[in-house]
Every structure is written in C-alpha cells, then in structure tokens.
Image: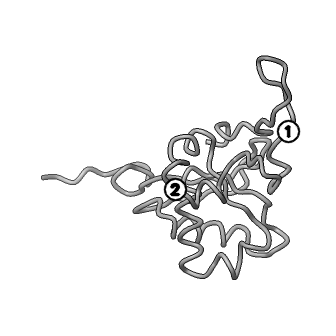
Amino acid sequence: MEEVERKNYFSAPRFYCVETICAPCGVVVAWAKFPKSESPTNILAFLEKVFHTEESRPNYICIDKACRVLRTAYRNGSWERIWKRTTRFIVDAYHYINHRDSDELCKKWCNPAPADGSAPNLVIEGKDKQGKSCFQRAFNTQASF
C-alpha cells in the first residue's frame, strides 16, 4: 500500500485530541495535543505544566473527568503536593447528574453546586417554579466544553 503524504500534522492517526484550558469568560488560556489518550495522568501533567505555581492555580477546574482526575491525583500524591491547598476539581452538571449516585468521591468532592456551603462561589440563591427560595448553580458548567 502506498503511503499518502499529509499536508498537515494534526490528523486522527497521529493525535487523539486537543485539550484546552479556558477562562470562565471563554478565552483559551492554554492548549495541548494529546497523542495517545486523554488519560487523567496526561490531564494532570498538562495542568501542572500550565499552573506551575501555587499563585497561578485556579480555585476551580471544571472537567468532565474531574472524578477520575481527582482520584489519580490522590493516588499519585499530586493532590497533597500540588492541588489540595488551591484547587477543587468539579465535573460539569451533566456528568454529575449521570453518576453522582454511584460515585461517592464525585458526590462529595466534584459537585458543581454543593448545597452544603463548601463552595459558596459555585451556588447562588434563586427561586424555583413556585417562587420558593432554593440554591442554583452559579455557572453554566456545560459552557466549558
């Protein structure tokens, strides 16, 4: 079989995905090509490269794989060493709804709108359909994808 010459380097056989870090306003802060997988280990390495100082780390990182990333950070020691003092990994609302019942770690630590007061910047007081006060997500976590 004759090999086809490619005009660009980014193609499915060469890279698995492009991962981006975006600010809440939507501006891309950083990006990286992941050649083989979007594994939690690769994600953590990317985050550590971008946020290499404690001062640069955000309070929250919203990612669909937050539970897996948190679990990997805990197991490899980077949670205690790097992230615990500065950052909380949260999942987007869709992923949280789909697996909060089966994943205790996700339920406790990756909730995008915890009502227990543990993350007051993620919730606001709003009104339900009947006009009764309730807590609501302060951010559209789906917009981060």
Assess disc 1: are there few (<14), some (14-19) or many (≥20) residues with their C-alpha within 10 Å of its C-alpha.
Answer: some
Q: Residue at x 56, y 58 (%)?
A: 104
Nearer to the camera, 127 or 76: 127
Occupied quadrant, residue 59: bottom right
Quadrant showing the C terminus:
top right
Q: Amino acid at mark 1?
A: Ile
Nearer to the camera, 134 or 69: 134
Occupied quadrant, residue 124: top right
Nearer to the camera, 134 or 8: 134
User: Is residue 84 depicted above or below 143 in this figure?
Assistant: below
Left or right, 12 with reference to 128: left
Nearer to the camera, 60 or 93: 93
Q: Between tags 1 and 2, which lies in front? A: 2
Q: Which residue is mark 2?
A: 103
Q: Which residue is mark 1?
A: 124
User: Is residue 22 depicted above or below 129 in this figure?
Assistant: below
Q: Residue at x 58, y 61 (%)?
A: 105
Q: Position of residue 89 (x, y in %)?
A: 67, 59
Q: Amino acid at mark 2?
A: Asp
Occupied quadrant, residue 141: top right
Q: Residue at x 86, y 29 (%)?
A: 133
Coloration mode = one colour
Left or right, 8 with reference to 140: left
Q: Position of residue 137 (x, y in %)?
A: 76, 38
